[in-house]
Amino acid sequence: MILDSSVIDHINSSLENFATYRIIPDIPIKLPNGTIVYANIKGTFIFFITFILHNVLYIPGFNFNLISGSQLAIKFGCFIRFTDQICEIQDNHTMRMIVFAKIHHILYVLENPKGQENTLPQLQFQ
């Protein structure tokens, strides 16, 4: 998953990544190359147990899975700090780190914290 501060919605390209999903009315999405595609599925994506996203749009064939940094910051009160090597996402009230991303070819790619694969969900962003 790539953290992107310019996308409006969370986007995922594989239904296999969704825990649940539902059909929605078509939503037009303009891609960076100018092409318009339509999302008609929205669902819940579990990246790892402390990071669950709801209302993620499914766009088949899209090259990246994107997390909207602006949605996290505005809707959920997350603090997002970028450096030249990493990006940290923290709860704005407790300052507890929720997730972090490392730079990879100018993109911030989310990392799964060690030991988080087999426990119950702790935070859910709707």
Image: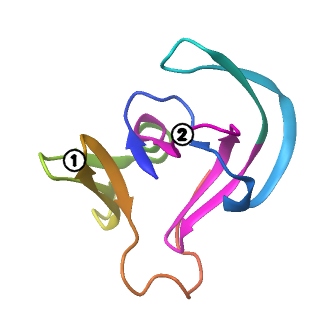
Q: Amino acid at mark 2?
A: Asn
- In the rendered image, the residue lying farthest to the top is 34
Residue plotted at (23% across, 51% down): 103
Q: Which residues are magenta?
A: 42-71
- In the rendered image, the residue lying farthest to the left is 84
Q: Is residue 9 above or below residue 97?
A: above
The CA span between labels 1 and 2 is 25 Å
Q: Nearer the viewer, residue 44 or 78?
A: 44
Pick whichever of labels 1 and 2 is earlier in the sequence.
2
Q: Residues within 10 Å of mark 1 (few under 14, many from 20)?
A: few
Q: Is residue 16 above or below residue 104?
A: below
Residue 53 is a magenta residue: yes
Q: Is residue 115 left or right of residue 85?
A: right
Front disc: 1 or 2: 2
| Whole-percent x, y for residue 105 in the image | 25, 44
Residue plotted at (31% across, 65% down): 94
Q: Is residue 31 left or right of residue 94?
A: right
Residue plotted at (80% across, 52% down): 21
Q: Nearer the viewer, residue 86 or 98?
A: 86
Q: Which residue is mark 1?
A: 81
Residue 18 is tagged as none
Q: Nearer the viewer, residue 109 or 62?
A: 62
Q: Residues within 10 Å of mark 2 (few under 14, many from 20)?
A: few
Q: Is residue 43 above or below residue 94?
A: above
Q: Which residue is mark 2?
A: 63
Q: Amino acid at mark 1?
A: Arg
Residue plotted at (68% across, 45% down): 55
